[in-house]
Image (tube, rainbow, N blue to C red):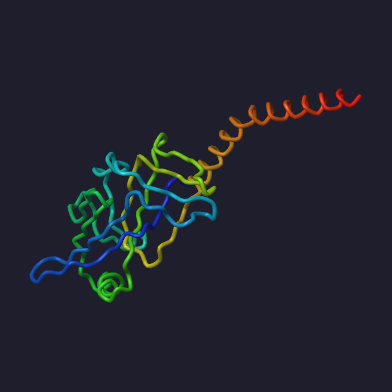
Amino acid sequence: MSDVEKRCFMGEVRTDETEGQPVKIIGYASVFDSRSELICGCFREIIKPGAFDGVLNDDVRGLFNHDPNYILGRTRSKTLSLSVDDRGLRYEILAPTTPTITDLVLSPMRRGDISQSSFAFRVARDGERWYQDDEGVIVREITRFSRLYDVSPVTYPAYTEADSAVRSMEAWRSQRDAQKQPELDAIIQREKRARILTLLDRS
Protein backbone atom coordinates (compact mmCIF):
# COMPACT_ATOMS: atom_id res chain seq x y z
CA MET A 1 0.00 0.00 0.00
CA SER A 2 1.56 3.29 -1.10
CA ASP A 3 2.12 6.21 1.26
CA VAL A 4 2.15 8.66 -1.65
CA GLU A 5 -0.92 10.90 -1.47
CA LYS A 6 -2.52 13.22 -4.02
CA ARG A 7 -4.67 16.20 -3.22
CA CYS A 8 -6.41 18.95 -5.10
CA PHE A 9 -6.85 22.19 -3.20
CA MET A 10 -8.56 25.20 -4.70
CA GLY A 11 -5.42 26.61 -6.30
CA GLU A 12 -6.01 28.05 -9.73
CA VAL A 13 -3.89 27.45 -12.83
CA ARG A 14 -3.64 29.52 -16.01
CA THR A 15 -1.48 30.07 -19.07
CA ASP A 16 0.78 33.08 -19.47
CA GLU A 17 1.48 33.83 -23.12
CA THR A 18 3.70 36.70 -24.25
CA GLU A 19 4.54 37.08 -27.91
CA GLY A 20 7.97 35.67 -28.68
CA GLN A 21 8.21 33.94 -25.27
CA PRO A 22 7.63 30.30 -24.28
CA VAL A 23 4.12 29.49 -23.05
CA LYS A 24 4.00 29.28 -19.25
CA ILE A 25 1.61 27.35 -17.06
CA ILE A 26 1.33 29.16 -13.73
CA GLY A 27 -0.60 27.92 -10.75
CA TYR A 28 -0.83 27.19 -7.05
CA ALA A 29 -0.61 23.52 -6.21
CA SER A 30 -1.57 24.14 -2.59
CA VAL A 31 -3.03 26.99 -0.56
CA PHE A 32 -2.07 27.51 3.08
CA ASP A 33 -4.54 27.54 5.97
CA SER A 34 -7.48 26.52 3.78
CA ARG A 35 -9.62 23.54 4.74
CA SER A 36 -9.98 20.87 2.11
CA GLU A 37 -13.24 19.23 1.19
CA LEU A 38 -14.17 16.16 3.22
CA ILE A 39 -11.66 13.40 2.41
CA CYS A 40 -12.84 9.77 2.43
CA GLY A 41 -15.99 11.05 4.10
CA CYS A 42 -14.27 11.42 7.45
CA PHE A 43 -11.69 14.24 7.76
CA ARG A 44 -10.46 17.54 6.36
CA GLU A 45 -6.90 18.76 5.82
CA ILE A 46 -5.09 22.04 6.34
CA ILE A 47 -1.61 22.75 4.95
CA LYS A 48 0.36 25.05 7.22
CA PRO A 49 2.95 27.63 6.11
CA GLY A 50 6.42 26.09 6.19
CA ALA A 51 5.20 22.60 5.25
CA PHE A 52 7.06 22.70 1.90
CA ASP A 53 10.31 24.19 3.22
CA GLY A 54 12.23 20.92 3.11
CA VAL A 55 11.08 19.70 -0.31
CA LEU A 56 11.51 22.66 -2.66
CA ASN A 57 14.80 21.22 -3.93
CA ASP A 58 13.32 17.79 -4.73
CA ASP A 59 13.38 16.59 -8.33
CA VAL A 60 9.74 17.45 -9.01
CA ARG A 61 7.78 16.85 -12.20
CA GLY A 62 5.03 18.91 -13.72
CA LEU A 63 2.40 16.47 -15.01
CA PHE A 64 -1.08 16.66 -16.46
CA ASN A 65 -3.58 14.88 -14.20
CA HIS A 66 -0.64 13.23 -12.39
CA ASP A 67 -0.08 11.12 -15.50
CA PRO A 68 3.64 10.45 -16.17
CA ASN A 69 2.81 9.99 -19.84
CA TYR A 70 2.06 13.72 -20.05
CA ILE A 71 5.09 15.47 -18.61
CA LEU A 72 4.99 19.24 -18.80
CA GLY A 73 8.20 20.15 -17.00
CA ARG A 74 10.79 19.14 -14.43
CA THR A 75 12.80 21.06 -11.85
CA ARG A 76 16.03 19.26 -12.73
CA SER A 77 15.79 20.43 -16.34
CA LYS A 78 14.73 23.93 -15.20
CA THR A 79 11.46 23.73 -17.12
CA LEU A 80 9.57 23.76 -13.80
CA SER A 81 10.22 26.20 -10.97
CA LEU A 82 8.70 26.13 -7.48
CA SER A 83 8.35 28.87 -4.92
CA VAL A 84 6.44 29.56 -1.73
CA ASP A 85 4.72 32.82 -0.90
CA ASP A 86 2.16 33.90 1.69
CA ARG A 87 -0.59 32.15 -0.25
CA GLY A 88 0.90 28.73 -0.87
CA LEU A 89 3.04 26.61 -3.20
CA ARG A 90 3.39 28.36 -6.57
CA TYR A 91 4.73 26.77 -9.73
CA GLU A 92 5.71 27.88 -13.21
CA ILE A 93 6.13 25.46 -16.11
CA LEU A 94 7.70 26.25 -19.46
CA ALA A 95 5.18 24.20 -21.37
CA PRO A 96 6.05 22.07 -24.38
CA THR A 97 4.03 23.13 -27.39
CA THR A 98 3.71 19.72 -29.00
CA PRO A 99 0.35 19.02 -30.68
CA THR A 100 -0.58 16.55 -27.90
CA ILE A 101 0.06 18.99 -25.03
CA THR A 102 -1.54 21.86 -26.94
CA ASP A 103 -4.71 19.86 -27.58
CA LEU A 104 -4.96 18.16 -24.17
CA VAL A 105 -3.74 20.90 -21.83
CA LEU A 106 -3.07 24.34 -23.29
CA SER A 107 -6.20 24.76 -25.40
CA PRO A 108 -8.59 23.67 -22.59
CA MET A 109 -6.75 26.00 -20.18
CA ARG A 110 -7.16 28.93 -22.55
CA ARG A 111 -10.89 28.21 -22.65
CA GLY A 112 -11.09 27.94 -18.86
CA ASP A 113 -11.98 24.24 -18.95
CA ILE A 114 -8.93 23.36 -16.81
CA SER A 115 -8.58 25.74 -13.89
CA GLN A 116 -7.37 23.78 -10.84
CA SER A 117 -4.17 22.21 -9.58
CA SER A 118 -3.10 19.24 -7.53
CA PHE A 119 0.11 17.82 -6.07
CA ALA A 120 1.51 14.43 -5.04
CA PHE A 121 3.36 14.19 -1.75
CA ARG A 122 4.47 12.22 1.27
CA VAL A 123 4.00 13.58 4.79
CA ALA A 124 6.98 13.53 7.16
CA ARG A 125 6.72 11.11 10.07
CA ASP A 126 6.38 13.98 12.57
CA GLY A 127 4.75 16.34 10.08
CA GLU A 128 1.07 16.05 10.97
CA ARG A 129 -1.26 16.80 13.83
CA TRP A 130 -4.75 15.37 14.25
CA TYR A 131 -7.55 16.92 16.29
CA GLN A 132 -11.29 17.23 16.49
CA ASP A 133 -12.70 20.74 16.24
CA ASP A 134 -15.62 22.24 18.17
CA GLU A 135 -18.07 21.03 15.52
CA GLY A 136 -16.84 17.44 15.80
CA VAL A 137 -14.96 17.49 12.48
CA ILE A 138 -11.66 15.57 12.44
CA VAL A 139 -8.86 17.73 11.05
CA ARG A 140 -5.43 16.71 9.80
CA GLU A 141 -3.00 19.61 10.01
CA ILE A 142 0.09 19.05 7.85
CA THR A 143 3.17 20.93 9.03
CA ARG A 144 5.95 19.19 7.10
CA PHE A 145 6.29 17.13 3.93
CA SER A 146 9.10 14.64 3.41
CA ARG A 147 8.73 14.43 -0.38
CA LEU A 148 7.09 16.34 -3.20
CA TYR A 149 6.64 14.24 -6.34
CA ASP A 150 4.69 16.35 -8.81
CA VAL A 151 2.47 19.34 -9.36
CA SER A 152 -0.34 18.96 -11.87
CA PRO A 153 -3.02 20.95 -13.62
CA VAL A 154 -6.06 18.70 -13.24
CA THR A 155 -9.40 18.17 -14.91
CA TYR A 156 -11.23 17.20 -11.70
CA PRO A 157 -10.44 18.36 -8.15
CA ALA A 158 -10.21 14.84 -6.74
CA TYR A 159 -8.93 13.85 -3.28
CA THR A 160 -7.28 10.60 -4.27
CA GLU A 161 -5.02 8.04 -2.67
CA ALA A 162 -5.68 8.85 0.96
CA ASP A 163 -4.99 5.37 2.35
CA SER A 164 -1.93 6.56 4.25
CA ALA A 165 -3.87 9.43 5.82
CA VAL A 166 -6.72 7.12 6.85
CA ARG A 167 -4.26 4.75 8.52
CA SER A 168 -2.71 7.69 10.35
CA MET A 169 -6.14 8.90 11.45
CA GLU A 170 -7.06 5.47 12.79
CA ALA A 171 -3.80 5.35 14.76
CA TRP A 172 -4.60 8.78 16.23
CA ARG A 173 -8.12 7.64 17.13
CA SER A 174 -6.77 4.53 18.87
CA GLN A 175 -4.25 6.58 20.84
CA ARG A 176 -6.91 9.14 21.76
CA ASP A 177 -9.32 6.43 22.90
CA ALA A 178 -6.56 4.72 24.91
CA GLN A 179 -5.83 8.02 26.68
CA LYS A 180 -9.53 8.52 27.40
CA GLN A 181 -10.05 5.01 28.79
CA PRO A 182 -8.64 5.71 32.30
CA GLU A 183 -10.99 8.71 32.51
CA LEU A 184 -13.94 6.55 31.45
CA ASP A 185 -12.95 3.84 33.94
CA ALA A 186 -12.80 6.42 36.74
CA ILE A 187 -16.27 7.72 35.82
CA ILE A 188 -17.66 4.17 35.81
CA GLN A 189 -16.11 3.46 39.21
CA ARG A 190 -17.56 6.67 40.66
CA GLU A 191 -21.00 5.77 39.34
CA LYS A 192 -20.72 2.27 40.82
CA ARG A 193 -19.75 3.68 44.23
CA ALA A 194 -22.61 6.15 44.08
CA ARG A 195 -25.10 3.37 43.31
CA ILE A 196 -23.74 1.26 46.19
CA LEU A 197 -24.04 4.18 48.62
CA THR A 198 -27.60 4.82 47.43
CA LEU A 199 -28.51 1.18 48.05
CA LEU A 200 -26.90 1.24 51.52
CA ASP A 201 -28.82 4.38 52.41
CA ARG A 202 -32.08 2.67 51.44
CA SER A 203 -31.38 -0.48 53.46
Tell me the quarter of the image containing the C terminus: top right
Q: Note whether 107 is above or below 67 in the view shown.
A: below
The residue under the point 82% across, 25% down is: 196
- Which residue sits at x=8%, y=70%? 20
Q: Eyeballing the image, is 136 above or below 65?
A: above
Residue 43 at what x, y percent from top left? 50, 50
Residue 110 spot, x, y in % from top left: 25, 74
Q: Does 50 appear above or below 115?
A: above
> Among all residues in the image, which is located at the extreme left?
20
Residue at x-position 19% and y-position 52%: 77
Q: Looking at this rendering, what residue extends furthest in the right direction?
A: 203
Residue at the front extreme, as displayed: 201
Is 167 or 169 nearer to us in this picture? 169
**Residue 58 spot, x, y in % from top left:** 27, 44
Quarter of the image for residue 104 reads: bottom left
Location of residue 16 with respect to 34 vertically, above or below: below
Residue 191 rendering spot, x and y as whole percentages: 75, 29
In screen coordinates, is 3 left or right of 67? right
The quarter holding residue 18 reads bottom left
Please give left or right for residue 14 compared with residue 191 in the image. Answer: left
Name which quarter of the figure residue 174 lies in. top right
Count of marks placed on residues: 0
